[in-house]
Amino acid sequence: MPVKYKDYYETLGVPRGATDADLKKAFRKLAREFHPDVAKNKKQAEEKFKAINEAYEVLGDPAKRKRYDELGANWQSGADFRPPSGWESFGRGRTSAGRGPGGGGQEFHFDGTGFSDFFEQFFGSTGGRGAAGFGRGGGFAEEDMGARGQDIEGDILVTLEEAMRGSVRSVSVRHGVACGQCGGTGQRNRRPCTACGSTGQVAKAEAYQVKIPTGVTEGQRLRVAGRGEAGAGGGPAGDLILRVRLARHPDFEVEDHNLIYQAEVAPWEAVLGANISVPTLSGHVSIKVPPGTQNGQKMRVRGRGLPQRGGGTGDLIIETHVEVPRQVTDSERKLWEQLASGSSFKPRE
Ligand SMILES: [Zn+2]
């Protein structure tokens, strides 16, 4: 079953040749506009926010972007997509993973994770899963003893706000379950079961409530026991494993449990000191920029980062960037000229 092509450039509203800086700028602008916490129409904004995140997750990563560009520019958004032949061999394509032993074409489709099937199949953490040893390999030698079902892996997009407060998400997975007609054996009355094509499995969509605990981190695997593929011959089911992908935030970078915020300051603010307003995940705080603050200097606001599992909270780290005005008015130029002639500051000595 083909997945729908996603035009990530269109999603971010940038041309295919956009620079990394253009991409970042476009992402930040859109992410601000559609961030679920600030948008007026939350439901609509949430869908858009997820799409923006997915697009930037791919285009904002040079290796993934290269891979995406290899698909060519002629695909229409929403068109049925199959990768060009040989494309999956470049990397982590999952197109052959998760198939039933009889080539039954068992595939997983997620809903509610925040990522599209297109992403999941070609850019998600499950890519290359077959090669990682999860595949069934050479058939069912152990069938008599009952083989454990495969784990189903996918990505789940978690916002920083969710990581902070925790949440419960409804995720649905279409996947293989034991065939009711033959009880998963693939045979009825010693004949191949027609209901499942003798694979012992049929596709079924099931919805689960997945708890996102506070303090989740990038890459953390949330395991829902027994919600993977059905076992064969009476074996236990595999697990559903969702790998956390923290949503990019327009204001913060994440480093462990710390949030990094880049604060732009005017040259006179850096020299004279100033009180500036800085966003946190729970409202703005006022920060004192000390006199003589250097470009790139860091300030730490304790306890305003992300919570840690087992207690404690990370910090908000503010990195100052002195912005220089590109244009000045005549009267401003006079002031700078006064400063230039009267200042004892010698930066190159
Ligand atoms: Zn059957």
Image: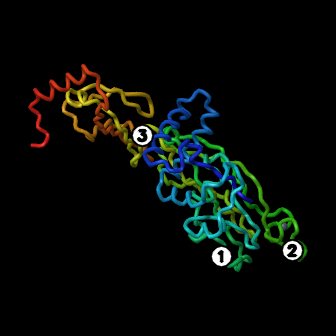
Q: Position of residue 311 (x, y in %)?
A: 41, 44
Dot 3: few (<14), some (14–19), or many (≥20) neighbours within 10 Å? Answer: many
Task: Label 3: state its secondary structure.
Answer: strand
Quickly name the residue at label 2.
Answer: 192
Whether label 2 touches label 1, CB < 8 Å: no
Rounded to the nearest whole Å, what is the CA distance between mark 1 and mark 3?
A: 43 Å
Rounded to the nearest whole Å, what is the CA distance between mark 2 and mark 1?
A: 21 Å
Task: Label 2: state its secondary structure.
Answer: strand
Q: Is residue 38 above or below residue 214?
A: above
Quickly name the residue at label 3.
Answer: 252
- Residue 15 is left or right of residue 208, and the answer is left
Q: Is residue 137 above or below residue 117?
A: below
Amino acid at circle 3? Phe
Residue 314 figure quarter: top left
Q: Nearer the viewer, mark 1 or mark 3?
A: 3
Q: Nearer the viewer, mark 3 or mark 2?
A: 3
Q: Position of residue 131 (x, y in %)?
A: 58, 71
Task: Label 1: state its secondary structure.
Answer: loop
- Residue 317 is left or right of residue 133, and the answer is left
Quickly name the residue at label 1.
Answer: 137
- Residue 197 is left or right of residue 27, and the answer is right
Q: Position of residue 161 (x, y in %)?
A: 50, 38
Q: Is residue 72 among the parts visible in the rendering?
A: yes
Q: Is residue 310 among the parts visible in the rendering?
A: no
Viewer-proximal residue among 80 and 101: 80
Q: Residue furthest top?
A: 331
Q: Residue at x 58, y 55 (%)?
A: 223
Dot 1: few (<14), some (14–19), or many (≥20) neighbours within 10 Å? Answer: few
Whether label 1 touches label 3, CB < 8 Å: no
Rounded to the nearest whole Å, what is the CA distance between mark 3 and mark 2?
A: 57 Å
Amino acid at circle 2? Pro
Q: Quadrant of ligand 1?
A: bottom right
